[in-house]
Image (cartoon, rainbow, N blue to C red):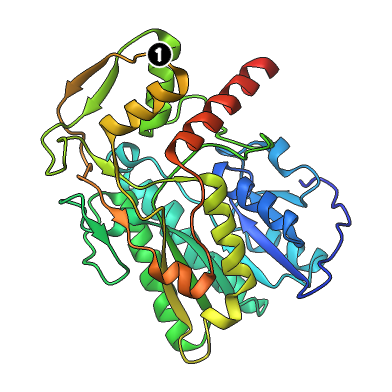
């Protein structure tokens, strides 16, 4: 099943078309919007297990599994001019991955291998991979660059590290070229509110804060004994629109970044600054102009102190830096939630 393709205008310079897996989800749909604004045509492949079908309207949406070879055959037959694949499709909930590791390895690793094999048959070799900063050793709340030690602390994080290794080996063999974007913690929504979090009860910290306020309850800080400046976990909260623009830059500069000599590249995407959970609560209070009660509990399985991105490589290779603040992310997330409520 698919929504009828719309003939979108090609970019006047460097015309490109991107297949975006998971393109009806939170990250993928925002990436698709940013691509379209940059003159890059989109084709969306999403099984809608968490994505929204309306996020794929007028974007060449195909509903199905990334490992479905027949579906990919049909997509390529309809769009033989696909230049690059932006691979965002994945299961992403850390506690869920701890409870169902086999399901996560199957969805995130096994099906990615099948996707790559099928893409190779169609001679589609450029891959931009939405990876995660969860692959880093994040016990100290420190800044990390792309050479920092890796120590995935959950099955989810391990799947990202495994796919990176697969892409690195595939690139070394000449099968593909790839850019892995290790991004940190996205918040907010498309500033024009065209897309946002499709899940009304997200598991990340800002989502939990918003749910607590909506329910008139205290927000739970999980873990207060981390080696950070205030004991709460530290993250690099990047606005999802900045993250989307980083993906666009990776698409546009792909051949200059993932070269024949260096066919696999890893690039951190973040703000370059850490924000603790307590500080995120403070940002929420600034934006809403209301206090938020909190309670403290033990760490969750799979949690880490966290880290923030050292982003020199993103600036040098992609010409990209984050421009939006944590307060901007909170403000846009709240505006998107208000929009969803008005439509329900």
> Extreme bottom residue here?
261
163 relative to 341, above or below: below
Most foreground residue, 337 or 25? 337
Circle 1 packing at 10 Å, graded few (<14), some (14-19), many (20+), is few
Query: What residue is shown at x 20% (from left), y 45% (from top)?
Result: 305
Q: Quadrant of the C terminus?
A: top right
Query: What residue is shown at x 78% (from left), y 72% (from top)?
Result: 15
Query: What residue is shown at x 38% (from left), y 25% (from top)?
Result: 208
Most foreground residue, 334 or 254? 334
Image spot of residue 330 (x, y percent): 47, 31
Image spot of residue 233 (x, y percent): 23, 39
Q: Looking at the rendering, which quadrant does residue 302 occupy?
A: top left
Image spot of residue 263 (x, y percent): 48, 83
Visible in this render: residue 196?
yes
- Number of marks in the image? 1
Left/right placement of residue 331 relative to residue 124 reads: left
Left/right placement of residue 245 relative to residue 220 reads: right
Most foreground residue, 117 or 214? 214
Visible in this render: residue 199?
no
Q: Looking at the rendering, which quadrant does residue 24 occupy?
A: top right
Query: What residue is shown at x 77% (from left), y 42% (from top)?
Result: 57
136 relative to 101, above or below: below
Residue matched to label 1? 290
Left/right placement of residue 323 relative to residue 44 reads: left
- Local SS, label 1: loop
């Amino acid at each position: 099943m698919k929504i009828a393709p719309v003939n979108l205008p090609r970019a006047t310079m460097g015309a490109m078309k991107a297949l975006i897996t998971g393109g009806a989800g939170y990250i993928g749909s925002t990436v698709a919007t940013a691509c379209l604004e940059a003159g890059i045509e989109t084709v969306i492949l999403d099984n809608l297990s968490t994505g929204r079908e309306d996020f794929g309207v007028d974007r060449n949406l195909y509903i199905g599994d990334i490992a479905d070879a027949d579906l990919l055959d049909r997509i390529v037959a309809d769009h033989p001019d696909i230049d690059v694949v932006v691979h965002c499709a994945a299961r992403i909930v850390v506690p869920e991955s701890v409870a169902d590791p086999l399901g996560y390895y199957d969805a995130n690793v096994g099906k990615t291998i099948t996707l790559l094999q099928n893409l190779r048959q169609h001679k589609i070799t450029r891959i931009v991979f939405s990876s995660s900063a969860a692959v880093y050793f994040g016990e100290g709340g420190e800044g990390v660059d792309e050479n920092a030690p890796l120590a995935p602390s959950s099955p989810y994080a391990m799947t990202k590290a495994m796919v990176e290794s697969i892409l690195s080996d595939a690139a070394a063999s000449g099968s593909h070229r790839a850019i892995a974007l290790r991004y940190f913690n996205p918040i907010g929504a498309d500033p024009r509110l065209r897309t946002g979090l499709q899940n009304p009860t997200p598991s990340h910290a800002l989502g939990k804060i918003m749910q607590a306020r909506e329910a008139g309850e205290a927000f739970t800080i999980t873990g207060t004994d981390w080696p950070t400046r205030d004991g709460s976990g530290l993250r690099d909260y990047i606005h999802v629109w900045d993250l989307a623009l980083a993906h666009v830059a990776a698409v546009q500069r792909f051949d200059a970044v993932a070269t024949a000599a260096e066919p696999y590249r890893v690039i951190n995407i973040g703000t370059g600054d850490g924000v603790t959970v307590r500080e995120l609560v403070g940002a929420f209070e600034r934006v809403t102009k209301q206090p938020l009660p909190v309670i403290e509990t033990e760490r969750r399985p799979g949690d880490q102190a966290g880290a923030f991105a050292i982003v020199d490589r993103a600036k040098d290779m992609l010409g990209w830096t984050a421009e939006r603040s944590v307060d901007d992310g909170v403000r846009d997330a709240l505006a998107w939630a208000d929009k969803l409520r008005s439509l329900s």
